[in-house]
Amino acid sequence: MATTTDDLPARHSLGKSMKRKEDPRFIRGKGRYLDDIVLPHMLYLALVHSPYPHARIKSIDKSKALALPGVKAVITGEDLDAAKLEWLPTFHGYDKQMVLAFGKALYQYQEVAGVVATSREIASDGAELVEVEYEPLDPLVTPFQAREDKIILRDDRESKTNHIYHWEVGDKAKAEGELDGSAVRIKERILSPRCHPAPLEPCGVLADMNKATGRLTVYMTSQAPHVHRTAFSLVTGIPEDKIHVISPDVGGGFGNKVPVYPGYVVATVASVIIGVPVKWVESRTENLTTTGFARDYHMDVEIGATKEGKVTALKVSTVADHGAFDAAADPRKYPAGMFGIVTGSYDFPTAFAEVDAYFTNKAPGGIAYRCSFRVTEASFAIERGMDILARKLDMDPVELRRRNFIKKEQFPYPSPLGFVYDSGDYEATTQKALDIIGYDELRKEQAEKRKSGELMGIGVSTFTEIVGAGPGKHFDILGIKMFDSAEIRIHPTGSGIVRAGTRHQGQGHETTWAQIVAEELGLDPQELLVEEGDTDTAPYGLGTYASRSTPVAGGALALAARRIREKGKKIAAHLLEASENDVEWKDYKFNLKGVPGKSVTMKEVAFAAYTNPPPDSEPGLEATYYYDPPNLTFPNGSYIAVVDVDRETGAVIVRRFLAVDDCGVVINPMIVEGQIHGGLTEGFAMAFMQEIAFDESGNNLNTNFTEYLVPTALETPHWETANTVTPSPHHPIGAKGVGESPNVGSPQAFVNAVMDALAPLGITHIDMPLTREKVWRAIRDAEAKVS
Amino acid sequence: MASHEFRTDRVEVAFTVNGKPVGLAVDPRATLLDTLRDELGLTGTKKGCDHGQCGACTVHVNGRRVNSCLSFAATHEGAAIDTIEGLGTPDNLHPMQRAFVELDGYQCGYCTPGQIMSAVALLAEPCGESDAEVAECMSGNVCRCGAYQNIVAAIQSVRKENAT
């Protein structure tokens, strides 16, 4: 089934590296991002933050701030409490979050008050003049401290415990029984550390309450504008028709722009009260300290196997740190997201996974950072676990994987944790990776180097992702089914406008959506305008995150286009003076069967739809489709990292990195390649650099880009890429989604490579990020043990 | 009583922006970045961190690249300031803009003006020939979409073009 891209039939618009329609504005500084929007008489909001991770708020004195010329309002949690706006719901609906702290501050940098003023500078000056008296309390810095329930964080909740939920899937007794009976067994605690997506454009809002019309327009950095409109309506009580959300150009999201943040609510409340537009754009420090973090999963991974390396059972027990509120934006029935993908690409006869989540004095979040709800954590756990098992068995890690791959004839494959994998050919994808990188040669080179004490490592990751939520019967956000939508209008002259419920943030939808529709209709993709992000015009959709745009909205686009084709066929029959049964769509036009050369194009059909429609038919040519996918899609990949570790300094050089991806049918290879580069860069960052860490007192240690290290051109490795194509059998165009695969699949390839390099020293595992210091310490400790 | 005092007086400054003379009375604390964006409406230059750590605000001052978020507008009396808006027109793109399109040197577009301004200034700097040296010379410009490989390729293609 797997083929290379070269083997696919020639297409009209799909599979082509069309240049981006976004190019002309983005390369000239003409993008229109949130902070570029200026409205007459608008005011600015600045927030006051708690310096303590846990403290009682004894008093707030606004008077000095209010006395500053230019300050129009100071808003506190008590003010919001009086207006019954003190809480906002979190997205999966099991918890709520304080808009502004009242009573207690629950994490360092928590929003305590808002100052609205005539300029950015005056608002900031005013924020400094708000005097807050705190009584510091002992903080809970780790979920293991929280688990003891000696300090209870949330007074507002009925249950007096820091335990948020227990979630489990699979057969615990059977998995444990199999593990006990296994000839070989490994167990390792593996941390997926807290990190932050940190898109380069910070989050922001410009709320504009028009008191004359009673209509609230909210410009916001939003990956899900329709859901945000619904959420705003639910929080404020303003009818949904009176709310207009516009998500303008978005400067990167990576999951960070899915939730609703306190700043959005305070700016909106201020605009509603004062009646003029109010803008809030967070600082980088606010972004890193208060908005959606990711990961923070402590995972105990156990795998059992036979001596021959056939896996028998998997058990993963996770302690999750959710911060002060449970603001993980997971689908309602899946508090631990898609963590059930933890069996990966392997045919486990039995498996069990459980997650226990706790409140701590840290910022809330747990959002999916460039992954489909906890898939990055799950994928890291299984791919690290397989490597640790391979070492215990003294077996090549690729060989171990191959002995356990789900075989291509096993698809659709029901996993022991409840998902039905749609398709894949893991053996073919892996073989391609091994051939390109020259795996056997690398192993020979490594054996030579080990003789002289050099630390060279080869790491593999043969991962399977799970993306494209819905189906709606299983997945919802705030009760709204996770479908997505498309609307296509073809104009009389054969150009058109395409709208979708998604909102791109660099994924190039303006180009790829046009390619999907053009492929279905035989039209020129350059003449199809794509519009997203305006809730007044776009059909309702759930937005862009979790690699769901192509799997869900991409399906809606193709099916809406096919509705246009259905109507077009009637018009074509009318034009060809034939019965509809005698007309067929072939070679991107309507042909009269059996009469070569007798055909009409979609462009001709479009003109006729307005000028010469069939008698007694409805004129015009447009269609809408709300697509609820029958299943998720399961992109996969085989990645190989080659590293050299400096024994003296702990420095890791990534010598080569190859990613062979299978994301099904490719819409635009150039854009897919860019997405893969980006995901690999972020995976590299997680493996080696990015972490939001806290000291024992609960102080955030990574509050700007000199402390929270993001990769630059200097340290980012050179990426080699290739692909195989195993089309999704249920997706209308066979696509699977790709934006997150490289981020999900790569961290473990890097870590496996470094651990492989350190194997001669007996080092099994080091938690990410693998900073030079951590690697150096591990080498030093290992050498001390030997000598 | 008041522990804080804030200056509200303004200072006058004159410079050129994209070749056009500009005279302004600015808050002495106003950065060049905020002045370009808020006073002059030139929003192509972006704010990513406001601490000189990301490069999204890169502009040219007298031909050299600077982080405009770390520079007070009032200190640029008589300077020639160039921003992305002055670089190329749709019909006549700067070769660096063309190369960013040809080699797909961006995704979300937010860091792109800073990357391009940085890359254009680099052409006049004593940067080594290799990809690694170009990557180092560009290490002040963060791209969270991770388009670095293509950004370096775009710069190298323009340098190659200029060398012939």
Image: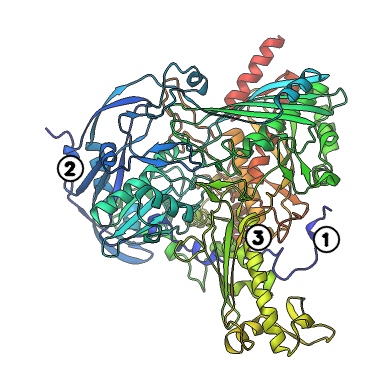
At a point 43% along the width and 54% down the height, the residue shown is A229
Kindly identify which residue carries mark 1. A7
Which sits earlier in the primary sequence, circle 3 or circle 2? 2
Residue, far left: B1
Display colour scheme:
rainbow
- The answer to whether any part of residue B130 appears in the image is no
Residue, far front: A616
Q: Which chain carries label 3?
A: A
For residue A484, what is the image quadrant?
bottom right
In the rendered structure, are the residues bearing label 3 and label 2 in contact, judged by CB atoms less than 8 Å apart? Answer: no
Kindly identify which residue carries mark 3. A555
Residue, far right: A308
2 and 1 marks on the same chain: yes
At a point 32% along the width and 43% down the height, the residue shown is A85
Kindly identify which residue carries mark 2. A66
Give the distance between the C-alpha atoms of the residues marked 3 and 2, in whole angstroms: 53 Å
Q: Is residue A15 left or right of residue A543?
A: right
- The answer to whether any part of residue A690 appears in the image is yes
3 and 2 marks on the same chain: yes
**A707 up-or-down from A605: above or below:** above
